[in-house]
Amino acid sequence: MKNILSLITIFVLFFSCGAQNSKENYINKLSTKSTTEKPKLVIGIVVDQMRYDYLTRFESKFGEGGFKRMISEGFNCKNNHFNYVPTYTGPGHASIYTGTAPKNHGIIGNNWYDKTTKEMVYCAGDDNVEPIGTTNRAGKMSPHRMQTTSFADENRLFTQGQGKTIGISLKDRGAILPAGHAANAAYWFHGQDEGAWISSSFYMNELPKWVTDFNTSEAAESYLKVWNTLYDISTYTESGTDENTFEGGFNGKDKATFPYDLAVLNKDNRGFDILKATPYGNSLTADFAMAAIKAEKLGEDNITDVLTVSFSSTDYVGHNFGVNSKEIEDTYIRLDKDLERFFKYLDVTVGKGEYTVFLTGDHGAIDVPSYLQSMKIPAGYLNNKATKTRFEAYVKAKFKNANLIENVSNNQIFLNRQFIESLGLNINDLQESMVNELISYKNVNKVFSAYTLTTTDFTTGIEALLQNGFNQKRSGDVILVPDPNYISYGKTGSTHGSGLNHDTHVPLLFFGKGIKHGETYKKTVIPDIASTMSALLGISFPNGATGEVLGFVID
Ligand SMILES: [Zn+2]
């Protein structure tokens, strides 16, 4: 009955809207629109460890063709956040492209304790594939631990495999997780004495000629040069002094001050790996991405291709020198130039207005805690060893058995469930008593049991972030939250991982085909990106996507 009614409605609507001719014209117009309105190429850009405030802090130093072009022509979501913890690179890239959180896609950390195999695993590690382009283990990688699809996967399905997908990043996980499962290729950089872009047998049996040509072109060698600031260092007023006690630096150089002679320093810093912690790692990534567009003919026809590019050097520089360093400022000024170069290349090859770009970060970063302390802001360093010793002593005294604990990692405690069961103990009671013990420890701010996270539906606050990051199958039994600004890290450099705003607030810029010009302070979250891109392309959403479509950015 319902069907007949709706048929009648369609009939009435169809014939009551004026002449048949104009209707046909309208339908024709619609169908032409739906094919030509699709971008020929979608480029997802992730800037590793990019805090939102880098956009505003370094604004006066940026040119018109990079970040500012995206803002002036596209849409700026100014209040964009990660909606889970932990804020690390693996979960970040997976969440951006699958449109959901670790709770669903399963990438709960960069490394985590695997409860089934009882060993630590790496998010992109895969012993069942072979390295391609190297004999090093660095090539034994695939996305097999990511349990849901990326929007690039859905585009592959939608286009009957005609739309290509290629993932590129210095970091394997930054290339592999975004590209998804059905990608044509993912390429990442192997430093040391090789300095080459590599892949794995998950994607191919050998590197295409353009990749081996690129690798033998001495592109990487050309960046082993002197790194000095692009502009006069005295104009870098948006960052701290060049010489301070909050920075790491490179082996073989006493002070973390400009200039850095990479041709000399690389010998004490794992060869080509030194490029990763300089802006030239990003330049090399941009060079390689442009070579991929050319050789793979990305964006040449009307079937949408997807290129994912992750700029990782920003993260290495942040970890080494801290978010307030001159090195970070110079790295962003130079990344802005690489983006300008990249967009100009896209204008010429794919065509202005024929491609769509989004840009975001995979997590933010904290100011170096020792620097925050110098500004009288509460911050510090965790003593994990002391916490662990005290907790183990408590378990031994209370339960007369230290074997109850199987692993402690990523602020989580994994209990030996089989053993606990054999003792006839109740796992939920055990979790709760541990929560009550741990909350009295120094610098432990909050503690939750797995039982709480699976039985209570949290909608706001750190509880909701923890819940989105909690994967029932893979996560631990007890989850700790350290005091704000307390990190497990050395005294120099920045890190990330928390649910605090410095780690969750990252840029989200869209520009190009199908994108409106504008900006919003409305809160958006990382999983919204993949849903929005799927809507823009008119394809199925990634199978686990939980993000909203940001309809206000779509033209
Ligand atoms: Zn990092």
Image: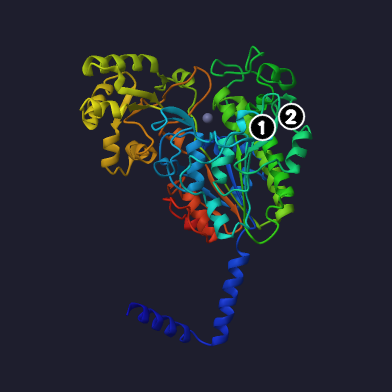
* SS assignment at label 2: helix
Q: Are marks 2 and 1 in contact (CB under 8 Å)?
A: yes
At 26% from the left edge and 41% from the top edge, which residue is drawn?
455
Please give the residue where the numbered disc 2 appears in the rendered image.
223
At 43% from the left edge and 53% from the top edge, which residue is drawn?
548
The quadrant of the picture occupied by the C terminus is: bottom right
Compared to residue 353, the image places residue 497 above or below, namely above
In the rendered image, the residue lying farthest to the top is: 254
Crowding near the residue tagged with mark 1, few <14, some 14–19, many ≥20 C-alpha atoms within 10 Å = many
> What mark, if any, has residue 304 been given in the picture?
none
Compared to residue 538, the image places residue 253 above or below, namely above
Snapshot quadrant of residue 254: top right
Residue 383 can be seen, yes or no? no
Crowding near the residue tagged with mark 2, few <14, some 14–19, many ≥20 C-alpha atoms within 10 Å = some
Q: Nearer the viewer, residue 340 or 193?
A: 193
Residue type at numbered disc 2: Tyr
Q: CA distance from mark 2 to mark 1?
A: 8 Å
Residue 472 horizontal/vertical position (percent): 34, 39
Q: Nearer the viewer, residue 505 or 292?
A: 292
Q: Nearer the viewer, residue 382 or 471?
A: 471
Residue type at numbered disc 1: Gly
Residue 488 horizontal/vertical position (percent): 44, 21
Please give the residue where the numbered disc 1 appears in the rendered image.
281
Residue 177 horizontal/vertical position (percent): 54, 41
